[in-house]
């Protein structure tokens, strides 16, 4: 199998993760969205199904995530899974108070990943098709909230491939970004004003472990027009996210106490 074939296979699986695939995805949609030829896509999907990563519904002919994906979840570090479960109720508090989309993010190596997302309750909402943020540390509130509190060497490793321009407001200058990160560290939180996605404003707070290192971040996104002339709404979001970030940080104190009791 060529490198390009592997990339296409992984792009296909990524598409299932980005989309709400619970009701299945048709072959035509996959071809239209990813630009594949029908015959080649059908052959590739058949192979993926044979390996257990997808399966095809016999009635609808749509493709769904297979059992092998769920086996992988059992291999994830327990701490990350437990942290996400602990955080959920606090994420929901933000969602209940603001009605807006809420994200819990962390990093794997040099990539920014979403651990949990709660969709907006409002009819006009942020487009969740933009969830692939792995190279957007510098352009998102969730990423910058972590980045600002990392040491310079770690920041260099994360940003070594440059600053990708997502919108006209994205920081593409390292000097500009460093100034922004300095302000974030001083203020204690980050915001993304259409830097990752046009028409979207986001506020993010870091979540620290027991050693004072940024482990994750929690953020809340809103359509820009809703907060443009409403400073009270921005403050409502900020206060809500700050409170939840503070509560989620207590996870590490609790796990430390459990560890001490276990050791005793």
Image (cartoon, rainbow, N blue to C red):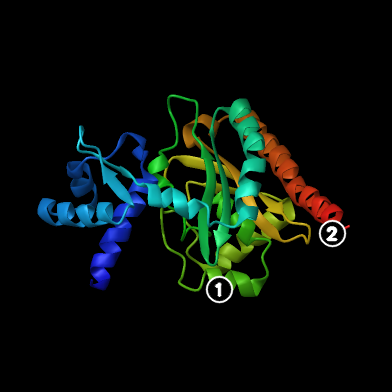
In the image, residue 177 sits, relative to residue 17, either above or below, namely below
Q: Which mark is drawn over residue 157?
A: 1
Q: Which residue is labeled 2 in the image?
A: 263
What residue is rendered at 85% in x and 56% in y?
260
In the image, residue 124 sits, relative to residue 170, either above or below, namely above
What residue is rendered at 31% in x and 48% in y?
54
What residue is rendered at 23% in x and 39% in y?
62
The crowd level at tag 1 (other Cα within 10 Å; few <14, some 14-19, many 20+) is few
Work out whether residue 15 can be spotted. yes
What residue is rendered at 19% in x and 38% in y?
61
Q: Is residue 117 left or right of residue 212?
A: left
The foreground one among 31 and 259 is 259
Q: Secondary structure at mark 2?
A: helix
Q: Position of residue 250 (x, y in %)?
A: 77, 46
Q: Is residue 212 left or right of residue 216?
A: right
Mark positioned earlier in the residue sequence (2 or 1): 1
Which quarter of the rendered picture does the C terminus lie within? bottom right
Closer to us: mark 2 or mark 1? Answer: 2
Q: Is residue 232 left or right of residue 198?
A: right
- Quote the CA–CA distance across marks 2 and 1: 36 Å
Q: Position of residue 172 (x, y in %)?
A: 47, 64
The foreground one among 71 and 247 is 71
The foreground one among 210 and 139 is 210
Q: Secondary structure at mark 1?
A: helix
Count the marks: how many?
2
């Amino acid at each position: 199998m060529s490198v390009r074939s592997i990339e296409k296979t992984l792009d296909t699986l990524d598409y299932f993760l980005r989309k709400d695939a619970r009701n299945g995805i048709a072959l035509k949609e996959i071809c239209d969205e990813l630009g594949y030829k029908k015959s080649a896509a059908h052959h590739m999907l058949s192979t993926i199904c044979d390996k257990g990563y997808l399966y095809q519904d016999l009635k609808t002919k749509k493709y769904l995530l297979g059992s092998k994906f769920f086996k992988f979840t059992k291999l994830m570090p327990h701490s990350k899974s437990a942290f996400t479960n602990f955080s959920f109720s606090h994420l929901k508090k933000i969602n209940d108070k603001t009605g807006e989309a809420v994200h819990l993010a962390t990093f794997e190596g040099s990539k920014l990943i979403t651990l949990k997302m709660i969709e907006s309750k409002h009819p006009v909402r942020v487009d969740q098709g933009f969830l692939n943020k792995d190279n957007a540390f510098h352009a998102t509130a969730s990423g910058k909230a972590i980045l600002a509190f990392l040491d310079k060497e770690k920041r260099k490793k994360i940003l070594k491939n440059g600053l990708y321009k997502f919108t006209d407001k994205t920081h593409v200058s390292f000097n500009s970004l460093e100034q922004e990160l300095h302000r974030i560290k001083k203020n204690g939180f980050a915001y993304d004003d259409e830097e990752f996605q046009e028409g979207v404003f986001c506020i993010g707070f870091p979540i620290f472990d027991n050693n004072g290192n940024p482990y994750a971040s929690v953020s809340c996104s809103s359509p820009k027009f809703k907060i443009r002339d409403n400073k009270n709404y921005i403050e409502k979001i900020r206060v809500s996210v700050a409170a939840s970030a503070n509560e989620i940080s207590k996870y590490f104190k609790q796990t430390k106490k459990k560890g001490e009791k276990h050791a005793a």
